[in-house]
Image (cartoon, rainbow, N blue to C red):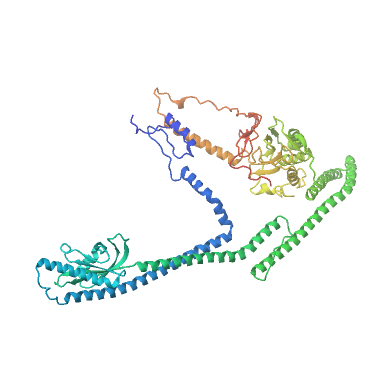
Amino acid sequence: MPLSSAAPQPGEPGARAERAAAPGHKASQVRRLLQGGRLFHDRAPGGPVPRLLMRWVRRPLLPAVRLWRRNLQLRVVAGTLLMSLGVVLLLGLVVIGQVRNGLLDAKGKAAQTQAAGGFAAAQEKANAPLTPGGQGGDAADGTSANNSWRTELVDQLASGGKNAFNVVALSADEGTRAPRGSGSVEAASIPQSLRDSVNKGPGAFQTYSLIQYANGQEPQPGLVVGKRLYDIDHNPYQLYYLFPLTQEEKSLTLVKGTLATAGLFVVVLLGAIAWFVVRQVVTPVRMAAGIAERLSAGRLQERMKVTGEDDIARLGEAFNKMAQNLQLKIQQLEELSRMQRRFVSDVSHELRTPLTTVRMAADVIHEARSDFDPVTARSAELLGDQLDRFESLLSDLLEISRFDAGAAALEAEPIDLRQVVRRVIGGAEPLAERKGTRIRVVGDEQPVIAEADARRVERVLRNLVVNAVEHGEGRDVVVRMAVAGGAVAVAVRDYGVGLKPGEATRVFNRFWRADPARARTTGGTGLGLSIAVEDARLHGGWLQAWGEPGGGSQFRLTLPRTADEPLRGSPIPLEPEDSRRNRESRERAAVASMTGSEHRLTAVPTQPGGNDRSSLPVPSRTPVAPRTTPVSVNPAALPGSGARVVARAAEDRPGGDFDSAVQDPERGDANRGH
């Protein structure tokens, strides 16, 4: 088979090697896979290599970008400098252009005047009568006299402008007579285009050219003016005046230097002025920002320093008045809050004495209800039930007042949360039997030890379990426990009405109800979850909620294993694995996997022998035992690690989707710490 054969079909060794190697080469610059003798090069424009290069280039620029975005004074001064620099450059170019044009115009006019006089003098000399004896001699003597005449003419014309101009005489026929020039000027300094123009027309022509010297002097730019004339023998020749522009260049250089110095001074001066002006405005703004931050931190006595009577001073006075009014309002609200808390506490304490008396009388009436008529006996039972609820409400109000006053104390000691969960489930069993709900415990194979207040933790879990049973619509309630690293967690999962979007944070508000029309069957006070979240915060932990409409809800309590140890994560994900989103993700992955398998099967050629696999009996699917994990969990199995931290038996899974809890490393704990 030649090297350029087709790529291997799915299912062949080459395709399997490609699928195995492709995921590991996402960060490499070049991916080479042997595929039928050909090499692949992964150099797509949007591939990993440009992203790595962009990240490598942007990383050193991040501090500068951050400083640019956060510093208003820097942006204003930099903008002023850039605009000033642009104005100075534009003005300098205009001035330099005007000066250069003026110098060249003046030089051109002076050169025309000087050259016109020289051309006239040369023509007069050619038209003058010859001296006696000038007619004698042979032709050779005539040629020598003509050459001598041109040399004398060039020297005579150039003598009037030493270092100001040079003169060059060229014959119409350069092959017979050599050029004559003054000041060691080479004839190559005269452009051929100017020579052609002089030969064609009778007038004077000029152009700019580079003047070259034969004595080793540096070439310099100059203005060349030429005209066609006739010598004493009436033979045409070309006479050129070459004017160096050395002085004009020096003048232009001086102007450029002066403009550059003045422009730099102006730019620096404008930058300093902008810095000074902006500082006058930015400094009070920065001061106001700092004072605002301190006010937000609770330091309500902070004020701005006001000087003068300008706009900034009026802004400072207005800011100080605002801060003063805000302080007064906050003090009034704090005083009102203290009065309310004291009122609640005093009323709760004062109500306990009459409530005790009423309780004693109600107990006597309740014991004697058998002697009453049915209506009075039922009233005695209702009186007892409502007194129980009244006592519970008073206890909750007293507990809330302790939290508000900061008087709640934590009595932490090492406890096993499994025993607490068993006590809570035992107390909730009668309600669960009436609701037809089964409470199951997951993750109690190993001890779940933490330093906590057993009374407060039991109160939190009792609220969660009772709420789950009440709102679970008769379905199972799963209590999951896990420990990993420095954290322990207990999650209560129900499959009832669930929570609507946004209710996961409001569910901990005092007296909040998801459905006000829904009747309470357990006589709740509406303060249970508020007290529970305060108990969790008192431990330094989290109490968080998740729910979806019609898909149930899950409440997760996360506590540190050691008191006063900060939490870094939870061993149980807040969103359970059997949520609607996770199920849809798994179904899409399964569909994609099945589609890939079908494509691979269609690529397999038919085996000889005529065996039809579709006619074979398909065995029924039997449940496969889930993959178990060790009981001991790596302490690093916190949110973001993706480790499996809780294992369950196959018979404890509802619907096969609740075998373990896996922390999603991408999602983390979005609702951490309400």
Asked whether, in this view, residue 157 is left or right of residue 431, the answer is left
Using the image as rendered, state which of residue 465 and residue 612 is in the foreground. Answer: 465
Up/down of 331 relative to 388, above or below:
below
The N terminus - image quarter = top left
In x, y percent, where is residue 286? 64, 60
Q: Quadrant of residue 155?
A: bottom left
Asked whether, in this view, residue 427 is left or right of residue 275, the answer is right
Using the image as rendered, state which of residue 12 and residue 211 is in the foreground. Answer: 211
Callout count: 0
In x, y percent, where is residue 605? 40, 28
Q: Residue shown at 43%/45% (left/top)?
A: 45
Asked whether, in this view, residue 526 is left or right of residue 227, the answer is right
Q: Quadrant of residue 461?
A: top right
In x, y percent, where is residue 670? 63, 45
Up/down of 512 relative to 209, above or below:
above
Let me know if residue 658 appears in the view.
no
Q: Residue shown at 37%/66% (left/top)?
A: 249
Q: Residue shown at 21%/64% (left/top)?
A: 179
In x, y percent, where is residue 256? 42, 66
- Residue at the extreme front of the image, as rendered: 133
Let me know if residue 599 appears in the view.
yes
Using the image as rendered, state which of residue 49 and residue 19 is in the foreground. Answer: 49
Up/down of 76 relative to 624, above or below:
below
